[in-house]
Image: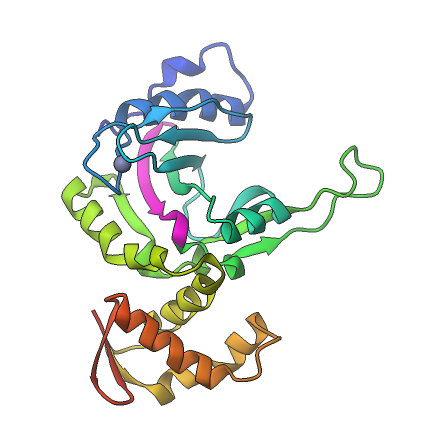
Amino acid sequence: MNLRLPTHFAEGYTSPAQRARRITEPWGSENLYCCACVSDRLGAEATNNQVSDFLCPNCAERYQLKSQRKPLGGTILGSNYQKMLDAILGNRTPNFFLLHYRLPEWFVHNLLLIPRFAISPSAILKRKPLSATARRSNWVGYQLDVGLIPNAAKIPLVVNGAEIPCREVREMYSRIAGIQELKPAQRGWTLDVLRCVESLPGTTFSNEEVYAFEAELAELYPGNHHIKDKIRQQLQVLRDRGLLTQPKRGIWQRV
Ligand SMILES: [Zn+2]
């Protein structure tokens, strides 16, 4: 992977957003690879103004590249809120590559992959509707909150300017890939419980320790009145997908 972005593609463009897209799209075609199979290339697809889309010629996984000059910890601007939620439930979201480039060198500093099946609806935050006088007055956008994605589903390809070997990237992808066997409507709960257990200090923990997230989860799922039962059920789901082991009843271990 060449971490130097091809800035000559931006010659003649002045808007920073346009320049970034002109530069990162050809870079993606040359350098991005499929994390779900062995394909070392992705094909560029027809694009719109905000994002670059890629398709694996081998397994047909879709990818979207979003780039920014800010570090990747916070929120990423998305487009239409309802369309995104429908896409999650319809299993039509692309995998997201999130690229943080450093200026003025135009160097790829960080690159993360979020697998398409690992985007919980709770990580999609609704933005304020556009004002009534705006051209698209009923249009509501979203932000993707990267902090609400489980760490296991934030797969690093480049960390602080250093590339992670492709073999390790694909291993990390396959470790979380069991989530895609779940129905899209069920994945949100599983991902949110995974994120909670990842934030516990130890790798071995009890049911009670996870119950500490009851209030937080109740806020995300106000319609559910049996949060503890749901937590236990989701711990079993995570175990069955190979993300946890259960050394004994009520005790869990992160893999
Ligand atoms: Zn592929």
Q: Quadrant of ligand 1?
A: top left
Specify whether residue 72 is painted magenta.
no
User: From what the image shows, is residue 246 above or below residue 147?
Assistant: below
Residue 209: image location, x then y, percent: 36, 85
Colour scheme employed for the rendering of this structure: rainbow
Residue lying at 37% horizontally and 48% vertically, measured from the top left: 114
The quarter of the rendered structure image containing the C terminus is bottom left
Residue lying at 18% horizontally and 36% vertically, measured from the top left: 38
2 sits left or right of 6 in the view = left
198 sits left or right of 40 in the view = right
Asked where in the image residue 149 lies, by quadrant, the reply is bottom left
Whether residue 212 is visible to the viewer of this picture, yes or no, is no
User: From what the image shows, is residue 236 above or below residue 77?
Assistant: below
Give the magenta range: 104-117
226 sits left or right of 154 in the view = right
Foreground of the two, 25 or 221: 221
Residue 142: image location, x then y, percent: 60, 48
* Count of marks overlaid on the render: 0
Residue lying at 31% horizontally and 34% vertically, measured from the top left: 108
Residue 71: image location, x then y, percent: 41, 45
Residue lying at 55% horizontally and 26% vertically, measured from the top left: 49
Asked where in the image residue 198 lies, by quadrant, the reply is bottom left
Residue 166: image location, x then y, percent: 18, 40
